[in-house]
Amino acid sequence: MQDVTQDDRKWIFSARLDFIAHVLPVLAGLALGPLFWRFVEPNELPLWGYLVIVVFCDVGHVWGTIFRTYLDTEENGRRWALYNLSPVALFAGMFLVHYTVSEAYFWMFVGYLAIFHFIRQQWGFLCLYRARAGEADGRMADCLVHLAGALGPILWWHSSPDREFDWFMRDDPFLVRIPPEVGKPVAVALWGAALGVYCVMQVAAYRAGTWNEGKCACMAGCWVTWAFGVLFPHKLVALLFLNMFHAAPSYMIVYFTARNKWRLQKPPTDAERFVRWCTLPGRWPYYLAFFVTIAVVEEVIWELFIWRDYFPDVAKFELTPLGKSFFTALLSLPQVVHYFLDAFIWKIESNPGLSDHLGLTYTVPTKKL
């Protein structure tokens, strides 16, 4: 991974790294998806796919939040209540839902929270591209087109009577079922109208010399990943698109934010010194290895206590309903805390120094919708 250069202002990281973050996952999905479709059963998730797409991509990037919060003593002290009390409240809420309502509704809740988080994260990267280009106009148009790209497939999914809400678990209930004669025409109209209008807008921007290619590549990636990730009833293909496109830029932005922060100031404790060491130039394999190691440990515990999908005979004990609810809530906590805190730790206006750590010269543009 290379440093962001001052001369390459239109990219979040650099042209090459932005390609890796936002384009390469889509190309990988388009290349590998047909092979998975041909050789892997629709409801099957082989161990190798689970390790690469779930553990490395999804679970690993979740732990990146600690570099921005718990391993940053200054930041942790600045918002101590947010970072240290919210996990307690989230754990209590998840435990109560799992134990007193049902496991199915627990995973439904976490699934919809994940969808909301994915949409918000993608919008955050689109906003970074807007900030890079100094765009003041068209914010509402970008937001609506992004929402159409995500909500169109989601609306179609909820209008398909032969599909289930299988974001995390098979046969989980939808929050709401939409009649297909209503939902599917609306989804198609929403998609078609948004795509047509946005294409016209981008042609006009190109002719005017204001076309933002990074933002458009990110927007296209959002549309493609939601289409394939939601509409295709194939578990491995869906995970391939959604998790890779979500994880790659997340890993990258945490890496560069931490590197730029501790390059500008002296790390005060061993925690920050470790973060600085992991994010020095050329150290990105160690950075990734750190999070993947944590992810593997977490998933081993999941497998022993809850899933027992791949090694069902290793654990010889059975949890009580209370114990299962406790461990499910506890093991889900890193993921849900990541969803929750991401809504706070990446807002430039409320995080001092973040604009510098992102390599931005940031001013709040005049909002013209």
Image (spheres, rainbow, N blue to C red):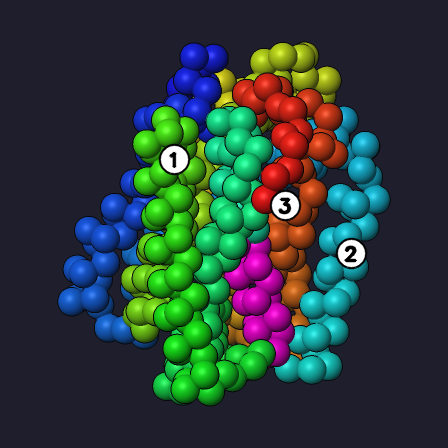
Q: Which mark is residue 342?
A: 3
Magenta stretch bounds: 103-119
Q: Secondary structure at mark 3?
A: helix
> Image point 48% across, 64% down: which residue?
151
Residue that label 2 marks: 88
Residue 226, percent from left and from top: 39, 59
> Image point 46% across, 20% down: which residue?
9
- Magenta residue check for 108: yes
Closest to the observer, 247 or 284: 247
Residue type at tag 2: Val
Tell me, yes or no, if residue 262 can be seen here: yes
Closest to the observer, 304 or 216: 216
Residue type at tag 3: Asp
Q: Quadrant of the N terminus?
A: top left
Estimate the spatial distance between the alpha carbons at disc 3 and disc 1, rounded to whole Å.
Answer: 31 Å
Crowd rating for badge 3 (residues with CA inside 10 Å; few <14, some 14–19, many 20+)? some
Which of pointers 3 and 2 lies earlier in the amino acid sequence? 2
Question: Does residue 282 appear to the left or right of 347 in the view shown?
Answer: left
